[in-house]
Image (spheres, grey):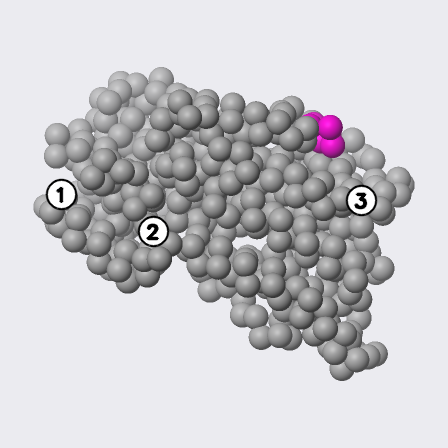
């Protein structure tokens, strides 16, 4: 057992993990960083298809402290994003602390607030704490329908290139951003393409008036005004979704993650994409839909999202329901010190405005925890901070909360001292029985 109690362990070296590592270094917090892949990049390295482009704009995706190259387009490609993230790591010398090809199999809380890690090579280490940045685009979520499909079933995560759809009859299940991208791809290269939707979605164009849509959402514009503006523009340039054979959304814009895609409606009107309702059952290569129609397909692409999960943590330690990790402040557990979960929320658009100030705030919280006996999450809970009710984040409101939180840090220390007196003899750190742990050595961890 190697004792590295003077260091934090950062799990993951994707865009968020790199920003956290940089912030820890700036605050003189020693750390080791673990990456299961052989290079940095996270989902941009292992999880996207070759023809992908970001749906958020360059200006709303770039790190606040490291702008993208000026010659990048408004919507950079997957390759450009990967090069940019790697340039960020090189510019700030972040590779020095990264152990590549190193998967964390287990992180176990100890009674004294430290954490024991087991690596895939069997090595065990003790760290002061864990910063989990393992992402949420890897644990595939599949729909379940009666019957069995005789053709190929593919998750959007496993789609890499147009050749997988070329000349085939394709059914895409889902209406999110990946679903619409892959349906548009199939419309170009496939024999045919249908898209199955359980509900209505807000399909928003990538640009309005020649400007990327996210850049039109000004910080001073309240959400109700943003909704009014978008609906007015959509009525003029799109019309009614029903006129495209698409179900009408039953929720307000931003109550669910909007789909930003300028191609879906184009291909629907050209007869290259055929909207379908939910699937009723499979029968060989035939798919039956709930409206009584049916069609034959070669490939079913499940663009149905991902589970939020932490396979290296004890089962149930992080409560997750409907894609929401129930942690105070989005990152802090009330029962355990020195555990920080980062990056489970879904922003309306690019991570750029939030990741740098968010990483800086978390590094300050790590230092603040060193001055406390009780977990920060417990202090937040007892201070009346509510648990999240959605996984969707308004970036402008989140930025305002971050600024308020930074100003409130000294007050949190005072609250912890008062709470400590109140809970004398009552608070005991929870422990996890080692024999209840099951460590999977095959699960993907990024």
Q: In the rendered structure, which disc, 2 or 3, sits on the residue that comes first in sequence?
A: 3
Residue 396 screen position, x and y as percent: 42, 54
How many C-alpha atoms fall within 10 Å of the one at disc 3: few (<14), some, or many (≥20)? some
Is residue 272 rendered magenta in the image? no
Q: Of residues 265 and 228, which is closer to you in this image? A: 228
Residue 182 screen position, x and y as percent: 32, 31
Residue occupied by mark 3 = 7
For the residues carrying marks 2 and 3, which lies nearer the camera in this image? 2
Q: In the rendered structure, which disc, 2 or 1, sits on the residue that comes first in sequence?
A: 2
Q: CA distance from mark 3 to mark 1?
A: 54 Å
Residue occupied by mark 1 = 237
The segment highlighted magenta reads 95-100
Q: For mark 1, give the secondary structure.
A: helix
**Residue at image coords 64%, 31%:** 92
On-image quarter of the C terminus: top right
Q: For mark 2, give the secondary structure.
A: loop
Residue occupied by mark 2 = 218
The answer to whether 256 is drawn above or below residue 55 in the figure is below
The answer to whether 279 is drawn above or below residue 319 in the figure is above
């Amino acid at each position: 057992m190697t004792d590295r109690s003077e260091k934090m362990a950062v799990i993951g070296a994707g865009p968020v993990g790199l920003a956290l590592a940089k912030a820890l270094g700036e605050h003189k917090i020693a750390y080791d960083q673990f990456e299961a892949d052989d290079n940095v990049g996270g989902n941009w390295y292992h999880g996207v298809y070759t023809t992908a482009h970001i749906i958020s704009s360059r200006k709303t995706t770039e790190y606040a402290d490291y702008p993208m190259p000026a010659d990048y387009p408004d919507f950079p490609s997957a390759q450009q994003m990967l090069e940019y993230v790697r340039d960020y790591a090189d510019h700030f010398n972040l590779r020095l602390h990264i152990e590549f090809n190193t998967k964390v199999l287990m992180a176990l809380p100890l009674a004294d607030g430290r954490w024991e890690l087991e690596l895939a090579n069997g090595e065990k280490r003790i760290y002061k704490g864990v910063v989990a940045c393992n992402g949420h685009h890897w644990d595939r979520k599949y729909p379940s329908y009666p019957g069995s499909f005789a053709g190929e079933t593919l998750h959007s995560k496993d789609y890499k290139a147009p050749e997988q759809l070329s000349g085939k009859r394709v059914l895409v299940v889902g209406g999110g951003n990946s679903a619409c991208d892959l349906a548009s791809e199939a419309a170009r290269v496939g024999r045919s393409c249908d898209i199955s939707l359980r509900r209505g979605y807000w399909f928003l164009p990538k640009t309005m008036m020649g400007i990327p849509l996210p850049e039109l959402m000004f910080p001073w514009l309240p959400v109700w005004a943003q909704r009014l503006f978008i609906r007015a523009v959509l009525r003029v340039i799109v019309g009614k979704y029903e006129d495209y054979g698409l179900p009408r959304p039953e929720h307000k814009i931003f109550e669910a993650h909007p789909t930003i895609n300028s191609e879906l409606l184009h291909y629907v009107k050209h007869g290259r994409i055929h909207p379908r309702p939910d699937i009723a059952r499979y029968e060989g290569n035939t798919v039956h839909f709930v409206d009584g129609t049916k069609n034959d397909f070669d490939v079913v692409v499940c663009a149905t999202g991902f589970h939020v999960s932490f396979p290296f943590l004890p089962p149930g330690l992080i409560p997750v329901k409907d894609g929401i990790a129930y942690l105070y402040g989005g990152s802090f557990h009330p029962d355990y010190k020195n555990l920080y979960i980062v990056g489970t929320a879904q922003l309306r658009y690019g991570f750029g405005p939030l990741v740098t100030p968010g990483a800086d705030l978390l590094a300050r919280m790590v230092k603040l925890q060193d001055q406390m006996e009780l977990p920060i999450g417990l202090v937040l809970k007892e201070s009346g901070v509510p648990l999240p009710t959605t996984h969707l984040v308004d970036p402008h409101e989140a930025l305002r909360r971050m600024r308020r939180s930074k100003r409130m840090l000294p007050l949190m220390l005072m609250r912890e001292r008062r709470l400590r007196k109140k809970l004398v003899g009552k608070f005991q750190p929870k422990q996890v029985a080692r024999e209840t742990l099951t460590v999977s050595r095959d699960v993907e961890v990024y």
